[in-house]
Image (cartoon, rainbow, N blue to C red):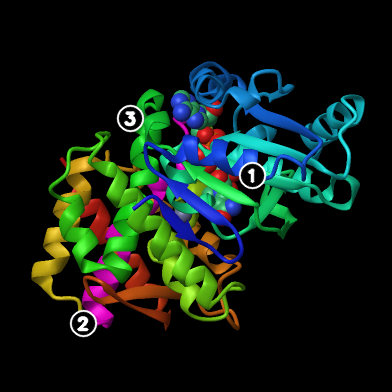
Amino acid sequence: MSFIQATDYPVFVGSKSLTDLHAWLEEKNNQYDKLFILVDELTNENCLPKLISTISLLDDVPVIEIPSGEENKNIEVCMSVWRMLSELEAGRNSLLINLGGGVIGDLGGFVASTFMRGIDYVNIPTTLLAQVDASVGGKVGVDLDYLKNQVGAFVNPVAVVVEPVFLRTLTKKQFLSGFAEVIKYGLTLDEKLWKNIKHIKLSSEELTPIIKRSIEIKNEIVLADPYEKGIRKTLNFGHTIGHALESFYLNKEKSIPLLHGEAVAAGMICECYLSYKLAGLSHYQLDKIVNYILSLYKRVRFSQRDFNSLLELMKHDKKNINGAINFTLLAEIGKAEINHEVEEQLIIDSLEYYVNRTQI
Ligand SMILES: NC(=O)c1ccc[n+]([C@@H]2O[C@H](COP(=O)([O-])OP(=O)(O)OC[C@H]3O[C@@H](n4cnc5c(N)ncnc54)[C@H](O)[C@@H]3O)[C@@H](O)[C@H]2O)c1
Ligand SMILES: [Zn+2]
């Protein structure tokens, strides 16, 4: 129940996962001369004590702290971590342990895979988003100015440790952001998962099997199509319109930041409407999905006068082929179809549908 084999590394999941990491580290005792832990100020406070108290071996390991937030996922912060590793005399046989959300995982993985031409790293994701999405797949990297994930590589960790207890200190907003990816896995690939998530209490222990199933799904897809040539595009459901909303909000002054999963949740509503129009999703299922998402997520505010800006943003999406806006749509719950090209008027209609459904 607590172990998934990814490409060539183990993913330990559940309440015994830290103990599993302890055993794994002991087994590798001779392989690594020095260990380092990377945190941000929030995981330093909320997660590090639990990690160290469970794994005595990590007691005296140097901790490198970087400031939290996407705005710090950049090359300057990488330089400060490379320098710290140098000063602390890290070597080719050192191991970096990333304890944090997707920012720590992406940046720490990038730092490790380039330091001295590459040292090993372990991911201990502490947000739901990082646990169910960023933790497997091997994408590491940083942002370049305002371009997300512009510099990076595919380099796998040597182990991943998913301990749901870390999620207890997450804000509800952050929690729901990660949960949108879980909903996406159910809708696109696993009807049983979709049925299960509707019956569980969020943020409870019951979540462990759901997290484990989500990681299995992501892992299977990544193994089948590591470079997103085909089936991995399934995971883009909700993201064509979701990414446009995310960028739209980034450019909007004085607005409360829109988290990735919040944008994807709204994107999934619009793309379910497109699925109903173009891919055979029934009206009954459309209604069920939309009602469920709206019961969890606050309305993302945009109106008719924003439709053209959103469309422009979609036209610049790197997922497009030959200039056409590319969608993954649902034929039914649990069954997705990739590579749908959708005409602009229908995309506008789907935005209109969202606005109408969320009007109070
Ligand atoms: N590599 C991939 O395949 C992949 C996939 C999806 C997303 N990502 C990347 O992940 C990033 C988003 O991840 P995220 O949402 O985890 O962001 P994040 O790392 O910024 O974490 C969100 C916030 O939660 C805080 N936090 C983390 N763990 C906590 C805990 N247990 N208790 C309290 N606070 C905690 C962090 O300090 C931060 O303020 C983006 O940069 C995105 O590009 C990567
Ligand atoms: Zn996503």
| Residue 263 within the magenta-colored segment of the rendering | yes
Callout 1 crowding tier (Cα within 10 Å): few <14, some 14–19, many ≥20: few
Return the disc, 2 or 1, that comes first in the chain's sequence.
1
* Amino acid type for the residue under numbered disc 1: Glu
Element assignment for label 3: helix
Mark-to-mark CA distance, 3 and 2? 34 Å
Q: Earlier in the sequence, mark 3 or mark 2?
A: 3
Determine which residue is flagged by label 2. 280
In this rendering, the answer to whether 93 lies above or below 256 is below
Asked whether disc 2 touches disc 1, contact meaning CB atoms under 8 Å apart, the reply is no
Tell whether 295 sits left or right of 49: left
Residue 234 as seen in the image, left or right of residue 91? left
Q: Looking at the picture, how far across and down is residue 41, in whole percent? A: 60, 19
Task: Tell me which amino acid carries mark 3.
Answer: Lys
- The residue where tag 3 is placed is 172
Name the one closer to the observer, 283 or 176: 176
CB contact under 8 Å: marks 3 and 2? no
Could you tell me which residue is drawn at 33 percent across and 59 percent down? 184
Q: Magenta-highlighted stretch: main secondary structure?
A: helix
Q: Residue at x 72, y 38 (%)?
A: 96
Which residue range is magenta in the image?
A: 254-280
Q: On the image, numbered disc 1 is attached to which residue? A: 27
Residue 250 in sight from this viewpoint: no
Name the side, left or right, on which 185 lies relative to 258: left
